[in-house]
Image (cartoon, grey):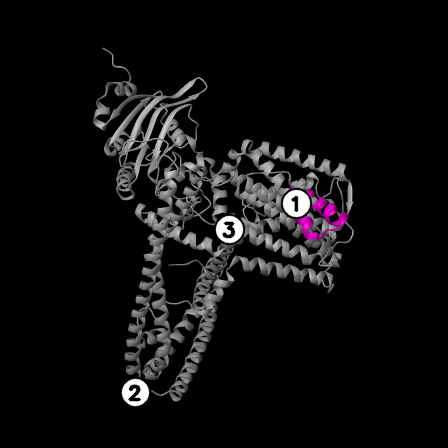
Amino acid sequence: MKKNLLNKYSLFAQDTFVQPQSKMIGIKKAASNPILHYIIFGVIIMVVLYMAVQLKVLPYSWYGGIIYTAAYSISSIGFCLLMGYSGLASLGTGGFIGIGCYAVYYVTALSGLPFIVSVIAAIVIAAVIGVIVGFISLRIESIYLVILTLGLSEILRNIYMSLSDSINIGTIKIFGSALKTADVMYVIIPVLIIIMIITHNIIVSPTGRAMLAMKNSTAAAQAMGISLLKYRLMAFIICTIYAAISGSMLILRSGAATASSGTSFYALITSLNILAAVIIGGYKSIWGAVFGTFVMYGLNSTILQSIPFFTENPALITIISGVLVIVVVMFYPGGLAQLLQNLKFTFAKWKKKIREDKYGKDIG
Amino acid sequence: MAKILANILPSPANKLALKRKELHWIVSELDSLEEVTSKREQEEIAKIKFSLNKRLNKAAFDACDKNEYVQELIYNKLLSYDVKNYMNHRALNHGLIKKIFKAKRENKPIDALIAEHDKKYDELKIKRAKYVDKLEQEKQRFLAKYTTTSSQDYENLKKELMLEFEQKADGIKKELAAKMQKTRAQLEQKAAKVKEEMAELKKQVPDAATLPDDVLLQVKGLKMYFGGLKAVDDLTFDVKKGEIFGLIGPNGAGKTTVFNCITRFYNATGGDMYFENRQGEVVDLRSFKVHDVILQGISRTFQNVELVKEISVLDNLLVACTREYRSGFWAHLIGLPMVKKEENILKLKAMRILKFMGIEAYANWYAMGLPYGILKKVEIARALMLDSRLIIMDEPAAGLNDTETADLAQTIKRIRDEFNATILLVEHDMKLVMGICDTVCAISFGQMLAIGTPQEVQANQAVQQAYLGAMEE
């Protein structure tokens, strides 16, 4: 109404209210920036952890569950980039995680250098191994590559066992003060958020598109000037580096690890869990990778443990993840990220159905 | 030692390639300059309009007829009230109909139902009447608060603002035009400088061979053996500049193998291939890797559509430009604004090409699920993104119906004329080949049967034999 009258009394009748963007739209635009979402997510996680550790509002087991999820998520995101965007597969995540653990042990705990140096050392070693696997991936593809990386992971694990079977890093100093277990979150969560933002940047950039093109058709990618060598190396280097960073975060939280035990960070079970996490969450989504990791590593200690039924039957907890993998692969090949999108449509359908039940069908 | 150093230090050829990239960007920036400026101009003018209107609003409110204003205000409020309550009325009516049907099925009286319905209906009516009363009171309050002033002030202000607008708009237009001129001059200066440097570097890099003036691609004695199988055996032909060259032959004749040799998917067993690239130098194609061929100005399409299905059509065109970006991996990783700027320039170009192909409506659609005919067009558009001199099309009409094929023939001709490209195509659709090709080359079992105009090839006996079998005497 006001619009009509003002149109009548305004200078330019037609396009008064079309241009330009108002302040509100500007805020909306800023809020739709995905990088801001990652930061907000990080803040929320920090608040939850603070509630669990300092305020004791939430049970303490939440702290361990979420921190482990965050640390493992880093390697899931790398795996997501490798599998969903470059079309390559690997079962070597466990072995690559070990690089980070042992770098922290040798460089920081034994030699006394700063923590950041050990992370850089882990990144350098991981990059070298990534280059090796990347070169191999030019010759070998699909299931054979998976077997090969599995072998490499076992070789790495045996090297760790002969180096030093069980490691204990003791207390680590960061910025001159000893890091307590309760303060680990101030290191791990920011690292996770930075990794998420970096990965997002890669995915939406020309590099991400080139990787997708390579996944879809190697012939077309090469004809468009995309070098398979360069991008496969890149994908594997990113994946191994992320896994190594994730390893150094894990050892920071746990303090000690044993290579010969079947449930250590660098056992085969880790590689399989990360694979399952990425499949559950959605192999083309960063949020999906994080959520899938939560299902694999965090769901048990946060939610399921508070349900008496599961504390009585702990075997059922492992069954849940197995059933989830089967259900997701059968009904939602795009993972839980796809499920969320489908839910939106389903809600719209329900709304329509409820309305029709209440008021009768639309007559026209 | 000198050899190692020569490998590490940038060679003149590498320097030349870098200069080329620079020149390419300067040229594309020059191309998109006008579009960017006009967009900017529209935005600025809209901003001015908005701010001027804001200044006028108060005067307009004072000048407007308050009776008319409040009438409209109240009408609108009532309308929105009715719209909101429409669902309630409908629910009542439909509920009544349902209940009556149910009661009739069970042979129960319906009078009570109708009475109940009427009661509810009356309640709604009373509610509405109350709302109307409230609006009436609002109207009185409004009229008491504001009075209508003379419209003279408003008219004066309007005239003043209109003048101001014209001045400001003129100023902005002039300013932007001057800015554009300045940028254009700067870019042109840069381009001239780069060209000079390139000319100097070019003297240090000798051509691989010399070609006749009108020849773009020369294939000499091409051989491709797979073990004992001679897929292509001693094939020689020239592709002239600006022509449509058709390669025909029965199934298994080795047409696609020839393509794959030219685009370096196969490493030819023997023979030479010389090509005059985008910069007018003659290069030996055999010295390039498969992913470097596109930089020389050869782009290709595929027999089966090979697009990235998970991204939009526009992004698919950008994939072709992966090698064009000046920003490297680290810039992508941090997400520098430079990447966005480059992408915007490329997007403008991509939109131009999509418009040329007549599929700009599909720019933001996912490639997954689009019809096959459109996907074929997208693939041709992708090949056009890099201003290639030679476009190689592998069976562009495969899977298209008659109308689409006729459309394709026109498109191919337009591409040749407007993009100054030479086209080399393999096709089984003889109507298309004979209709548009300037030269046709027929091969069979990797060997040349005939080359010449379509009529000559059609009349050739060897070709007829290869297609139709030997004539019995």
As drawn, the label of residue A220 is none
Mark 1 Cα shell of 10 Å, populated few (<14), some (14-19), many (≥20): many
Query: Which kind of residue does numbered mark 2 sit on?
Result: Ser
The x and y percentages for residue B231 are 39, 22
Nearer to the camera, B143 or B128? B143
The residue under label 3 is which amino acid type?
His
Residue underneath mark 3: B332
Query: Secondary structure under badge 2?
Result: loop
As rendered, which of A131 and B248 lies closer to the eye? A131
User: Which mark's residue is nearer the viewer, 1 or 3?
Assistant: 3
- Looking at the rendering, the stretch of residues picked out in magenta corresponds to A98-125
Residue B50 in the image, given as x and y percentages of width and height? 37, 72
Tag 1, which chain? A
Q: Chain of mark 3?
A: B
Viewer-side residue, A336 vs B175: B175
The 10 Å Cα crowd at callout 2, few under 14, some 14 to 19, many 20 or more, is few
